[in-house]
Image (cartoon, helix red, strand yellow):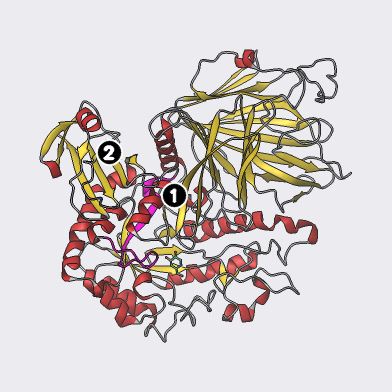
Amino acid sequence: MAIYFDEASKLFYLEGKGYSYVFGVNEVGFLEHYYFGRRIGRDDVRYARAFSGRYADAAVPGYTDDIHQCYNHYGAELSCYGVGDNHECSLQIRHPDGSRLSEFFYESYEILGEKPKIAGMPSMTGGETLVVTVKEKYTDIRVRLYYTAYDDASVLARHAEIENGTKGDIDLLRAYSFTVNFPHHDYETMTLEGAWARERHPERRPLHHGTVAIDTKMGASGTLNPFMALLDKNTTEDAGEIFGFNLVYSSSFVLKAQTDNMGKVRVMGGINDFDFSWRLASGECFATPEVVLAYSGEGIGGMSRAYHDAYREHLINPRFVHAKRPVVINNWEATYFDFNNERLMAIMDVVSGSGIDTFVLDDGWFGTRNDDHQALGDWYVNEEKLKGGLKTIIGHCHSLGMKFGLWFEPEMISPNSDLYRAHPDWAIAVPGRESALGRFQMVLDITRPEVRDYVVNAVCSMIRDNEIDYIKWDFNRLLTENWSAALPAEREQEMHHRYALGLYDLCERIIEGNPTVFFEGCAGGGGRFDPALLHYFPQYWTSDDTDAYMRTQVQYGTSIVYPPSTISCHTSICPNHQTGRTTPFATRADIAHFGPTGYELDTTKMTEEEKDAVRGQVDAFREMEDLVVSGDLYRFEDPHTSNYFAVAHVAKDKSRAVITAFRALVRANDENKRIYPRGLDADTVYYVREMDAKLSGATLMQVGIPLPNDPVDFKTFVFHLSKV
Ligand code: DGJ
């Protein structure tokens, strides 16, 4: 039982693997948070509640004589604005009289064996769910706070539902997904900052009085990931406490850690309230996106594995999460827009029989798409390029025993397209104003049902009329105008959230509607790599930077939260198209075995040696694939701070492991380097194939593995371990 309520003390205990989360109903009926951290007994932890003299702070109305009752000193589960709480709030409501204050008090609770879905949004499944209802003191507005805990997972999922039981409209000016309180501020934050081609680089910053915040404002989770962690200053990869907060959300978000003048910290976040409001009519309900909290007392690596396990078991599309993955050859970096049947077939022919089992036709196959200035939205084949339509190319692909994949960018429209000429109003734009183009394209207003119907029909009819096994769903620009032609003026600030709801509807209808097709997500590389989209896309293109060295950094950072099974990686051509760097072919493949793998190069230009190597590389991936898809990941050299990168993909039962190490630059007369693996079973004796040695896990982890001093830059060293 992960959830327990003590009637006498009115304390709720949420107990996942390794942690306790305790809150309760206080003397005035307010929901107060008391503890989140390493698992403790079911004690009454209110003894530690800190009360400081109220001085100028306002008392809870009706409690003027009790200096203990003051919103500013409570650890709030739901923090509201306007009645004495000087912190950032998580809910702000504008009432019909224009006032923006509210006070919520406990009404009831319920424990559900089955987790209800969140209307219109993806969320975690399974677990045990506590629903606590609080009611506004003066109105019939209720908030239901949802908490889902798992006996076997170190995560806690939360979201809120706001119900307008009044007779009039109210406006939500802010509706975050959660607030969590910490009693002191001896912490740092960790976020995953990034930009195009250098996504998800971990960044640590000390807390300071005031607010540390990250947000996006352009209708997508973007390259700045919707993740923040609070961690002890001394926490390392292997030791120390860390608390993760990851929003299951794909549009504009905010995450904040606020340190108040008494040294307490509140972490909160959800839909970005900048340029947001939501008109909630009488009788309507508004659901916030989910946030997944994680706790680890075993360092950053422990938190990563908590997220990896929880997302694989409770979030990611169960049809594919543990499945054997396609090993693709993608034509993008080989041809860009310049291809015809012959060129594509030649690329396939070279790798036929190599184990590469899927050909993916990228951007440029439709309409007049000869460059990136046109044709998005015109989802019919460009027969100038592909004579005989897709049937010719698919037929050839199948004749080689390969599956066929196709690229789409369903949410976009080019101003130079038949779709735009027919429906100019379907593009997001404010009439009378020139629109900002990104990559020469506009975004379709998928908040509108008729636009979504067009997109669903366009993609699904291509799938229906052709034998398509795989789809790459791209998204190459962010939203600018937060405005829809279909909304009344007072609802325009709902647009970015409605875009997310429209996107999830598209995913439900297209992805769930085609259950045998494998969908890979993509967003101009690895933007919008978020848990909500991982619910639909079992893997996601990680970055347009395919340089092996830079990929060690991006893949390391991405794995802080997301499992290797989701981190799509390709071996590409050198000199690399993004960095100009040349790295050994073997290195590119070894680094691309970090997650589901593939190739993205002109195979007709490979050397004979490279062509011969591909078969062995695919076999090597297939040998470790179960560890990549379903195993545990341990990181022990961080390429952001070291000349080395080293990770181990370890079987859940610890019977096998593959260790991949990488040295960036050779240094003359360098010190002898050893790597110290993690995650092995100390008592198990492993055969290390590359060393032809039998060594215990304890020895390997303590004595380490020396790396040869080969004078080759960007070299990988791979070790296969199996239980003797
Ligand atoms: C961006 C993606 O990340 C690339 O892999 C490729 O699909 C291009 N878009 C195509 O326009």
**For the residues marked 1 and 2, what is the alpha-carbon distance in whole angstroms?**
21 Å
Q: Residue 713 location, x and y as percent?
A: 25, 55
Does the segment drawn in magenta span residue 710? no
Quarter of the image with the C terminus is top left
Does the segment drawn in magenta span residue 566? yes
Vertical arrangement, residue 408 with respect to residue 260, above or below: below
Residue picked out by circle 1: 317
Vertical arrangement, residue 205 with respect to residue 624, above or below: above
**In this image, 511 relative to 419: left or right?**
left
Q: Secondary structure at mark 2?
A: loop
The residue sitting at the right extreme is 97
Q: Secondary structure at mark 1?
A: loop
Q: Residue 363 location, x and y as percent?
A: 44, 72
Which of label 1 and label 2 is nearer to you? 2
The residue sitting at the front extreme is 669
**In this image, 640 relative to 433: left or right?**
left
For badge 2, the amino acid type reads Ala
Vertical arrangement, residue 263 with respect to residue 533, above or below: above
**In this image, 343 relative to 168: left or right?**
left
Q: Is residue 399 visible?
A: no
The residues colored magenta run: 562-583
The structure residue drawn at horizontal position 40% and vertical position 70%, both measured from the top left corner, is 362
**Which of these two is toward me, 45 or 145?**
45
Vertical arrangement, residue 458 with respect to residue 268, above or below: below
The quarter of the image that holds ligand 1 is bottom left
For badge 1, the amino acid type reads Asn
Query: Between disc 1 and disc 2, whose residue precedes?
Result: 1
Q: Residue 157 location, x and y as percent?
A: 54, 36
Disc 1 crowd, CA 10 A, few/some/many (<14, 14-19, 20+):
many
Task: Write down the quadrant of residue 158 in the picture.
Answer: top right
Residue picked out by circle 2: 651
